Amino acid sequence: MQKLMVDAPFPSGSIPASKTAADRFFLATCVGLVAMNVLTFGYHATGSGVLNGVSNMCSLLLIGYSIVVIFASDADNHFHKILAALACAFAGLSFLANMSVASVPDTLKYISIFTFYLAGQASPGRIGVGEKRCIYLLGILPLLFMLTGSTKIYVGREYPDVVAYFPNSNTAALYFSALFFALSPWLGNKVLVLQFMNALLMNRVGPALATIVSIGVWSVFPLRKEVVLAFIVIAIGGIGAFAAGALDRLITGLDSIALIWNLGPSTIARTSYKQLVIMTGTTDLSAFFRVIHWSNIWDLYTSQGIGVILFGYGSGQTGYIASAPMPPHNDYLRILAEYGLFSFVIFVVFVASILASLKQQAPRILFTVLLIYFISENLVDNFTSMALFFAYAGRATAKPVVRKPYLYSVARG
């Protein structure tokens, strides 16, 4: 009897755990995100704390599952694994340095950015039918909520701009941007049209400017016929939107940015809101509020000693110690102030390396929108959006994996 070693597919029951976990990661994540958003839908419709608690439990399970996928994988992504390990280490040191005040949920949300990306890199392949259906459902759920009534959670004067179960239209615009990003490898440049419509419909300065700048940066060179045609379509759409008044807030925002540029941020930070209203002729002072708020947070960060400079003053604490009781409206500044200098450097290197690794045009533009949008908003807290952006960025930058055939013995007589 002679035994020969032959190449064959994985025999039944012998598929490695890493292959199974990786192949199921995106479908499991998308199903989990749908479950989370259904629970969030119910929480905002009823105010039930139980639904909110179960929703938070779903997010913890998804983070845990992404970690399992990472450890089960043998993907060749050592650079990003080192960055993720350093991010976890420095976030942990920041938490220990500020243990009495640091927020566990905020720390986990920050770390999950790295874990979802690495898990996405460990799961290359085409977007599946089940994933697409889940992403479509994620897009439908907020629209269904808007038809059912209003939220019982985001109420009062501090929430003047609620959209569905999102606290404001900036958050809603980011959410739909994340859905488009997830679909971009399949839909290609068509998602850019949807993204531009998203920015116009939300009528917010941040997403509109970020979209315009991103499309301009990545589309101008080399100048092709398609690019010229796209700019003509955008220009016509912009003229129509201007005539309908949909760009009023964008124009106000650009005027505010011009004034900040001319006077200087330090002068704006010392100017009262009453004086700004007189100077600008508008009560829409969101751009000025951000500059004043950023200056206050910077002063807090730089005036509390070397320990705070290196490890921050604690995750989730800006809203408690700043003069305005809310996060910084700038995630780069927030990570610097709450987690410290080490975490800030790791985060910037991490997102820059992702952008440099994206090769397809549409995903690269939408990821640039996210990085620009980080400058003016609090986005890291948006669990679904961050999970989609970074998990699918991981898939888009993953190296092709060639499955090695399983070798086993076959007896021949």
Image (cartoon, rainbow, N blue to C red):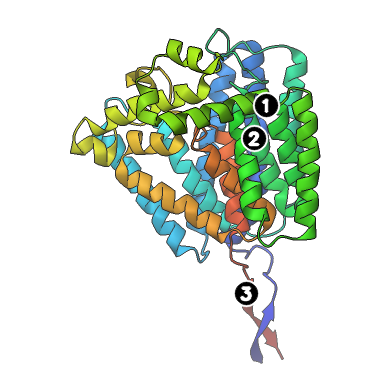
Dot 2 falls on a residue whose secondary structure is helix
* Residue type for callout 2: Ala
Of labels 3 and 2, earlier in sequence is 2
Q: Nearer the viewer, mark 3 or mark 2?
A: 2
Quick check: 345 above or below 304? Answer: below
Say which residue appears at 81% left-offset and 51% top-offset. Answer: 229
Say which residue appears at 54% left-offset and 54% top-offset. Answer: 355
Q: Which quarter of the rendering shows the C terminus? A: bottom right
Dot 1 falls on a residue whose secondary structure is loop
Q: Nearer the viewer, mark 3 or mark 1?
A: 1
Asked if the residues shown at circle 2 and circle 1 are in contact, with their CB atoms under 8 angstroms apart, the answer is yes
- Which residue has dot 1 on it? 203
Q: Which mark is residue 170?
A: none
Q: Nearer the viewer, residue 327 or 27?
A: 327
Of labels 3 and 1, earlier in sequence is 1
Of labels 2 and 1, earlier in sequence is 1
Dot 2 alpha-carbon crowd within 10 angstroms: few under 14, some 14 to 19, many 20 or more: many
Say which residue appears at 79% left-offset and 36% top-offset. Answer: 237
Q: Nearer the viewer, residue 130 or 80?
A: 80
- Which residue has dot 3 on it? 404
Q: Nearer the viewer, residue 72 or 349?
A: 349
Q: Is residue 313 visible?
A: no
Residue 78 place in picture, x, y as percent: 44, 63
Quick check: 234 above or below 397? Answer: above
Quick check: 3 above or below 149? Answer: below
Residue 26 place in picture, x, y as percent: 65, 48
Asked if the residues shown at circle 3 and circle 1 are in contact, with their CB atoms under 8 angstroms apart, the answer is no
Tell me the CA gap for discs 2 and 1: 7 Å
* Residue type for callout 1: Asn
Quick check: 318 above or below 362? Answer: above
* Residue type for callout 3: Lys
Tell me the CA gap for discs 3 and 2: 46 Å
